[in-house]
Image (cartoon, rainbow, N blue to C red):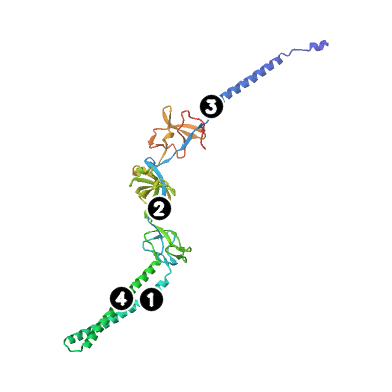
């Protein structure tokens, strides 16, 4: 062996320490990461991110009307005009003139349409001429009767004095009776012609279609040139010319179930909400409970009258009627922000609600909540559309994860 090379060999003591430090550094980093992981898990757990989501029902904060507090039950129906008519002609003919259109407002007696009536007018003129001739004949007959009466009177006086022949007296008497019969015949002819003239005028009036009451034209069922018949007996004829309604007679007709019928009485206050006017609530009163039931549906028809008609209300609009236990005061017409009372719960002796914040529950205390029937009035810090947990379970707490229904 080479002694020089052996003498150059040395033990490196620092080389033995480096693996120990390296192992210690690895263990320290792992311990730090473990502590960070424990702290992170603890934070996530406290934030509810690692806890199992709680399945809950959600309700929204909304506007509530005071009428909802005193509502016994609700029913749906339609706006119906109590005075409505399909106006037609009593005569048959071709429509010659139409004076109205949809939406036209008319008064009772106004002309809506007219049928062709030239033939009837000609007949009336002919009868009028015959009547004029008959009246002239009556004048002539009355004149002849007057002459015959005077002649008969003179000869009768002479006959009583035996100053004339009996034949002359009898001829004068017969002439007088004959002239009186002619006068009576002329009177009868005049009466018959006057009756015929009246009939012709009535037939002409049948061709003139007039409004039966004050109202508004809803539909136009025939056009100029179409044949109109009273009963629409032919396929190509129209029975009605227009359909009109009295808009001052509008009511809501609603079907009330037999179970709810004991809660209804005549004169009962109601609140009417129309789908077409969703932001408007109209007051009404039960006007009639129709004394018959629909056995197939188990309902009774109830008519609700508007306390004050809105010009925007139209026939056949769908409506919802709330039957109230009492009439509302003037200050009870404005809505307020509220939520269903089942959303309110207690935590640590304080009333509050769990506001849905994303997918977490955020505990929000309430300051002196005021009950209004099944609802709780909310202050100005709440806004319409806020979602809160309905009937929150006992284990629900601030920050809990939520599972919301789809």
- Residue occupied by mark 4: 188
Q: Quadrant of the N terminus?
A: top right
Q: Residues within 10 Å of mark 3 (few under 14, many from 20)?
A: some
Between tags 4 and 2, which lies in front?
4
Name which of mark 2 and mark 1 comes first in the sequence.
2
Name which of mark 1 and mark 3 comes first in the sequence.
3
As measured in the structure, the alpha-carbon distance from the residue carrying label 2 to the one carrying label 3 is 62 Å
Between tags 2 and 1, which lies in front?
1
Residue 17: x %, y % from top left: 69, 15
Name which of mark 4 and mark 2 comes first in the sequence.
2
- The answer to the question of whether label 2 and label 1 lie on touching residues, with beta carbons closer than 8 A, is no
Please, what secondary structure does the residue beneath circle 1 have? helix
Residue 219: x %, y % from top left: 44, 58
Name which of mark 2 and mark 3 comes first in the sequence.
3
- Residue occupied by mark 2: 80
**Depth check: 272 or 195 in front?**
195
């Amino acid at each position: 062996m080479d002694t020089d090379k052996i003498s150059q060999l040395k033990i490196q003591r620092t080389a033995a320490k480096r693996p120990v430090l390296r192992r210690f550094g690895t263990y320290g980093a792992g311990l730090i990461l473990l502590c960070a992981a424990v702290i992170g898990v603890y934070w996530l757990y406290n934030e509810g991110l690692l806890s199992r989501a709680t399945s809950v029902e959600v309700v929204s904060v909304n506007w509530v009307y005071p009428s909802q507090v005193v509502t016994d039950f609700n029913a749906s129906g339609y706006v119906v005009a109590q005075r409505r008519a399909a106006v037609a002609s009593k005569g048959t003919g071709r429509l010659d003139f139409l004076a109205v259109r949809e939406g036209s407002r008319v008064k009772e007696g106004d002309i809506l349409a007219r049928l062709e009536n030239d033939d009837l007018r000609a007949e009336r003129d002919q009868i009028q001429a015959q009547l004029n001739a008959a009246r002239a004949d009556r004048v002539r007959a009355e004149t002849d009767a007057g002459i015959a009466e005077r002649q008969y009177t003179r000869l009768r006086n002479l006959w009583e004095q035996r100053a004339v022949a009996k034949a002359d007296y009898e001829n004068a008497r017969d002439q007088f009776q004959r002239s009186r019969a002619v006068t009576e015949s002329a009177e009868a002819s005049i009466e018959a012609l006057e009756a015929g003239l009246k009939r012709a005028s009535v037939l002409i009036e049948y061709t003139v279609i007039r409004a039966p009451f004050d109202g508004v034209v809803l539909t136009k069922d025939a056009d100029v040139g179409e044949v109109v018949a009273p009963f629409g007996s032919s396929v190509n004829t129209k029975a009605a010319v227009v359909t009109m309604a009295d808009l001052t007679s509008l009511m809501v007709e609603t079907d009330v179930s037999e179970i709810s019928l004991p809660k209804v009485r005549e004169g009962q206050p109601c609140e009417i909400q129309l789908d077409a006017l969703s932001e408007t609530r109209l007051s009404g009163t039960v006007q009639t409970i129709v004394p018959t039931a629909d056995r197939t549906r188990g309902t009774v028809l109830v008519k609700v009258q508007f306390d004050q008609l809105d010009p925007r209300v139209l026939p056949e609009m769908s409506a919802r009627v709330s039957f109230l236990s009492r009439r509302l005061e003037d200050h009870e017409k404005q809505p307020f922000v509220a939520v269903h009372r089942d959303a309110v719960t207690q935590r640590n002796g304080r009333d509050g609600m769990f506001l849905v914040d994303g997918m977490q529950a955020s505990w929000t205390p309430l300051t002196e909540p005021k009950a209004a029937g099944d609802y709780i009035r909310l202050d100005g810090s709440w806004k319409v559309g806020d979602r809160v947990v309905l009937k929150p379970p006992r284990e629900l707490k601030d920050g809990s994860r939520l599972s919301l229904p789809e």
